[in-house]
Image (cartoon, rainbow, N blue to C red):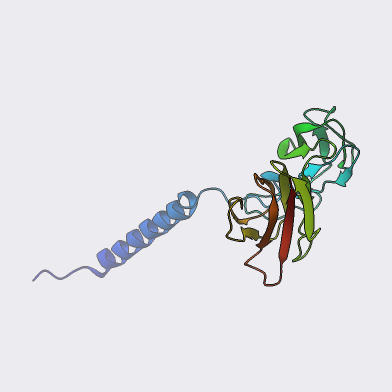
């Protein structure tokens, strides 16, 4: 058997080491792509508790800039507010919204050129009712409407549902949701109880008059 020269063995080790180092460099340089920026604005979230207002009512709309990981960015810059239809909703530079004429339009908040949108409805005077959900309560506990009118359920950031008593004339349940306004129409007279089954004791009622 031919005897290997120690110099040849040493040279082979050096070559393999260099190749392994180059391979590692290529993997590190090309394998994972660019890291996610924690300071670049990826989205703007408008987290107002109210998506339904009455003429003349005001509501403060907060806006939060978040990065691609969904984390809030501190010091992302000034927020620029605008309304798609100022006749329905007006908004000042601090995000204070004032309801005008009945209708539906959008409020936008922009940070670093990235825009967030919140759709808001202004109800006609004396039409329907609004139920909010501060904490784990329906406020007001009972609302009164007329047949074929709507109740607007304002879901906050916390997740809730609205499950109606199983009786004729009860509308469709509202499954788990958050940060949105959902309307339900009541076509017959009567009293309709409902619960948030996620939070025991969170109950409400709709009284529908002819």
117 vs 89, left or right, is left
Closer to us: 52 or 169: 169
| Image quadrant where residue 16 sits | bottom left
Q: Is residue 114 visible?
A: yes
162 vs 123, left or right, is left
Q: Picture coordinates of residue 54 (x, y %)?
A: 85, 40
Instruction: Assign the N terminus to one quadrant of the image.
Output: bottom left
Closer to us: 172 or 122: 172
Residue visible at 46% across and 49% down in the picture: 30
Residue visible at 11% across and 69% down in the picture: 2
192 vs 24, left or right, is right
Residue visible at 49% across and 52% down in the picture: 32
Q: Picture coordinates of residue 13 (x, y %)?
A: 32, 65
In this view, 23 is above or below 105: below
User: What is the total number of numbered labels drawn onto the structure image?
Assistant: 0
| Residue furthest to the front | 210
Closer to us: 207 or 158: 207
Q: Is residue 41 visible?
A: no
Q: Picture coordinates of residue 156 (x, y %)?
A: 73, 55
Closer to us: 171 or 123: 171
Instruction: Assign the C terminus to one quadrant of the image.
Output: top right
């Amino acid at each position: 058997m031919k005897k290997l020269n120690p110099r040849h063995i040493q040279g082979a080790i050096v070559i393999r080491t260099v190749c392994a180092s180059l391979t590692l460099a290529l993997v590190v340089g090309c394998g994972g792509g660019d890291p996610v920026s924690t300071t670049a604005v990826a989205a703007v979230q408008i987290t107002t508790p109210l998506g339904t207002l009455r003429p003349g009512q005001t509501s403060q709309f907060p806006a939060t800039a978040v990065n691609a990981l969904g984390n809030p960015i501190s010091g992302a810059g000034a927020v620029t507010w605008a309304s798609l239809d100022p006749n329905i909703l007006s908004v000042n530079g601090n995000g204070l919204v004032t309801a005008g004429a009945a209708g539906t339009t959008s409020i936008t908040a922009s940070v670093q050129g990235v825009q967030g949108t919140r759709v808001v409805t202004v109800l006609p005077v004396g039409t329907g009712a609004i139920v909010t959900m501060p904490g784990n309560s329906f406020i007001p506990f009972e609302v009164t409407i007329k047949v074929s009118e709507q109740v607007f359920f304002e879901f906050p950031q916390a997740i809730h549902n609205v499950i109606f008593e199983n009786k004729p004339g009860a509308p469709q349940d509202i499954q788990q949701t958050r940060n949105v306004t959902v309307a339900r129409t009541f076509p017959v007279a009567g009293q309709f109880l409902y619960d948030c089954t996620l939070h025991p004791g969170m109950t409400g009622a709709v009284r529908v008059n002819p």
